[in-house]
Image: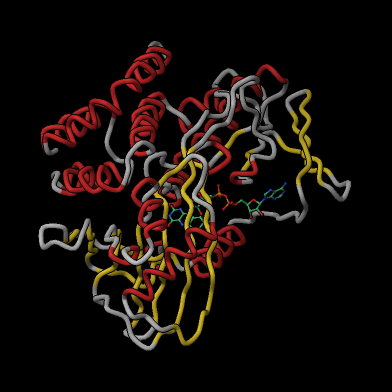
Amino acid sequence: MGLEDCLSPVWNQAHVFLDSSTQGKKVLRRPYGRVDRPRLKKQLLARCIKHGVVFHKGVVKGAEHGEGVSSVQCADGTAVHSSVVLDATGHTRQLIQFAEGKKFDPGYQGAYGITAKVESHPFDVDSMLFMDWRDEHTAADPAMQNSNEKLPTFLYVMPFAKDRLFLEETSLVARPAVDFPELKERLQARMQHYGIKVTEVEDEEYCLIPMGGVLPQVPQRILGNGGSAGMVHPSTGYMVARTLGGAPTLADAIVEQLCAPTDKASSSRSEPGPQNEQEANAMAASIWNEAIWPVERLRQRIFFNFGMEVLLKLNLTDTRQFFAAFFDLSDHHWQGFLSARLTFPQLIGFGLALFVNSSNRARANLLAKGTPGLIGVFFNLAKTVGK
Ligand SMILES: Cc1cc2nc3c(=O)[nH]c(=O)nc-3n(C[C@H](O)[C@H](O)[C@H](O)COP(=O)(O)OP(=O)(O)OC[C@H]3O[C@@H](n4cnc5c(N)ncnc54)[C@H](O)[C@@H]3O)c2cc1C
């Protein structure tokens, strides 16, 4: 059983509605799957058990290092000792250090959603609805219409059956976050407009994902992965696929570093792992630079951060124009951008193609809202030269 078996259901295509016009509907010919989290967790745990992973249940409070050994302290007073510690505490970032004086100032993706049984709904069950930017549901409420124009949110729908679906009102990125009561109110207005009558709410989802902002100190003695290492795609909020995809590379880099001293032909050592702090720091630095934040990924993130800063400035009209140009790009460009598979030079090509594809008004907008951020892009890129 592979991790792809943890996707259920899978839709063969997705829809985007920019507005209610015929041209406003886009069909994205790319499969879209929902991660079955209990199944994924079960499968990952089974793999760990099969390979002899030993678990220790506890709340981590801190870590100390000395003589090449790290000691992780738990709230119950126990300690776990090891050569390498990886912080996977997500956005709590319990052990990972950030550069002092640097403010953590991310954008936030906020969303409120429900999984519900309904009498009926108007969505095509063979497609998932990736983004619905239509705003007719706000017509009867000028205050909602106004706030949605300034800070737009979209509807995201996974239709499971004709009478069961997941609906979520999502703010792509905002700083500060759009709050949950507002998201809930907009979702209810939308459901009323679409004539969706809920018969049972099975689950409620409150989502708040920090996006972009400063990275942890690279390198540092403690390793990071996922949320703790700032791996969320700053322009989309996605991270799960990328982190799972990168996990084997990270695991290989750790094994390689731990075994390097014993692998040397001249070595008389029998035990893998560092023997002092200098070695431990050097090993951690190699892993950060090769597998967690290699220079190519750092440059990619600079571009995505720039994208996020532009998105933060777009109102509903601008957002529609942006996505009209975005989804008219080649599959290679829009899919590569969303899945973080484009290299930095390819991202430059993406940016130019987006600019060429945009309407005159959208181009003027991109120039006005993007140009100030370009200085930061060049400054941050300069810091990666020679790494
Ligand atoms: C409602 C919602 C919907 C989302 N949808 C998507 C999506 O569609 N696609 C996508 O890519 N991302 C999505 N995300 C974001 C994604 O879930 C997170 O970015 C991801 O889970 C972060 O993974 P992680 O392993 O780094 O951290 P987490 O999944 O947060 O896991 C961290 C773990 O560490 C534990 N922990 C924390 N502190 C301590 C401590 N001191 N001691 C011991 N354990 C500790 C926590 O209990 C938790 O089990 C969504 C998030 C939410 C909330």
Q: Which quadrant of the rendered structure holds the C terminus? A: top left
Q: Tell me the residue at 25%/46% (across/down).
A: 317
Which colour scheme appears in the figure? secondary structure
Percent of width and height locating residue 323: 23, 47
| Quadrant position of residue 268 | top right
Q: How many marks?
A: 0
Left or right: where 315 falls relative to 202: left
Q: Is residue 288 above or below residue 6?
A: above
| Quadrant position of residue 280 | top right
Q: Is residue 56 above or below residue 274?
A: below
Percent of width and height locating residue 32: 30, 62
Q: Nearer the viewer, residue 235 or 319?
A: 319
Percent of width and height locating residue 372: 33, 20
Percent of width and height locating residue 106: 51, 36
Q: Nearer the viewer, residue 24 or 251?
A: 24
| Quadrant position of residue 216 | top right
Q: Nearer the viewer, residue 286 or 340?
A: 340
Left or right: where 9 falls relative to 181: left
Q: Which quadrant of the rendered structure holds the N terminus? A: bottom left
Residue 110 visible here: yes
Q: Tell me the residue at 34%/39% (across/down).
A: 311
Q: Nearer the viewer, residue 152 or 383?
A: 152
Q: Tell me the residue at 39%/38% (across/down).
A: 312
Left or right: where 66 falls relative to 372: right
Residue 283 visible here: no
Residue found at the very far right of the displayed protein? 77
